[in-house]
């Protein structure tokens, strides 16, 4: 349940965040940006984590604190993926309830549930050049 932060330039661990989630973290997602959009340099200081049953957390690398939580999607049975939009304004999350969820990054406001899929949505991604979202479902 702990997160360890590595400085790749120095080649060593720089910090450990104990008890980041109540269950094991199953995905870490950093804002990658896109060559098709621009963002403030500060946007790259944030990363997301998610754990089954514990929502999504937004962390600040400078303070190592959880700045925001994103809840509302269901992630009890399967590890459901997360993604940051190319513009850095939105977060997408998969869900056990067969929907993908879109949140506004700065306010953690739930914006939209996307499509009724046939199975749990286990992975999500954004098109790097346009505001389209892609989902992947779990077949049982």
Image (cartoon, rainbow, N blue to C red):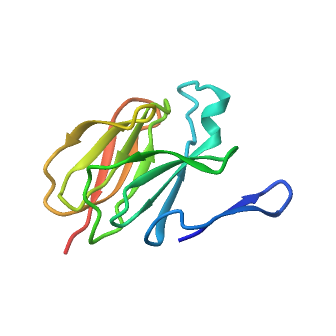
Q: Picture coordinates of residue 58 (x, y %)? A: 50, 47
- Total number of numbered discs in the rendering: 0
Which quadrant holds residue 95? bottom left
Q: Picture coordinates of residue 61 (x, y %)? A: 66, 47
Which quadrant holds residue 85? top left
Which quadrant holds residue 127? top left
Relative vertical location of residue 57 with respect to residue 1 in this rendering, above or below:
above
Quadrant (top left/top right/bottom left/bottom right) for the C terminus: bottom left
Question: Residue 134 versus residue 48: which sits nearer the camera?
Answer: 48
Relative vertical location of residue 33 with respect to residue 27 in this rendering, above or below:
above
Question: Residue 119 versus residue 73: which sits nearer the camera?
Answer: 73
Residue situated furthest bottom in the rendering:
140
Residue at left offset 47%, top offset 72%: 24
Relative vertical location of residue 79 with respect to residue 43 in this rendering, above or below:
below
Q: Picture coordinates of residue 47 (x, y %)? A: 56, 48
Residue at left offset 30%, top offset 70%: 78
Q: Picture coordinates of residue 60 (x, y %)? A: 61, 44
Residue at left offset 25%, top offset 67%: 138
Relative vertical location of residue 14 with respect to residue 48 in this rendering, above or below:
below
Residue at left offset 78%, top offset 57%: 8
Left or right: 46 as drawn, with respect to 99? right
């Amino acid at each position: 349940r702990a997160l360890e932060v590595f400085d790749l330039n120095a080649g060593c661990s720089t910090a450990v965040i104990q008890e980041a989630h109540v269950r094991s973290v199953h995905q870490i997602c950093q804002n990658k940006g896109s060559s098709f959009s621009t963002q403030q340099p500060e946007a790259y200081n944030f990363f997301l984590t998610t754990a089954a049953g514990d929502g999504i957390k937004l962390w600040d690398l400078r303070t190592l604190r959880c700045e925001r939580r994103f809840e509302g999607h269901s992630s009890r049975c399967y590890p459901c993926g997360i993604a940051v939009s190319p513009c850095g304004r939105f977060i997408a999350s998969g869900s056990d309830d067969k929907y993908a969820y879109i949140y506004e990054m700065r306010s953690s406001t739930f914006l939209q549930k996307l499509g009724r899929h046939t199975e749990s949505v286990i992975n999500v991604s954004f098109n790097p050049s346009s505001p389209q979202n892609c989902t992947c479902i779990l077949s049982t």
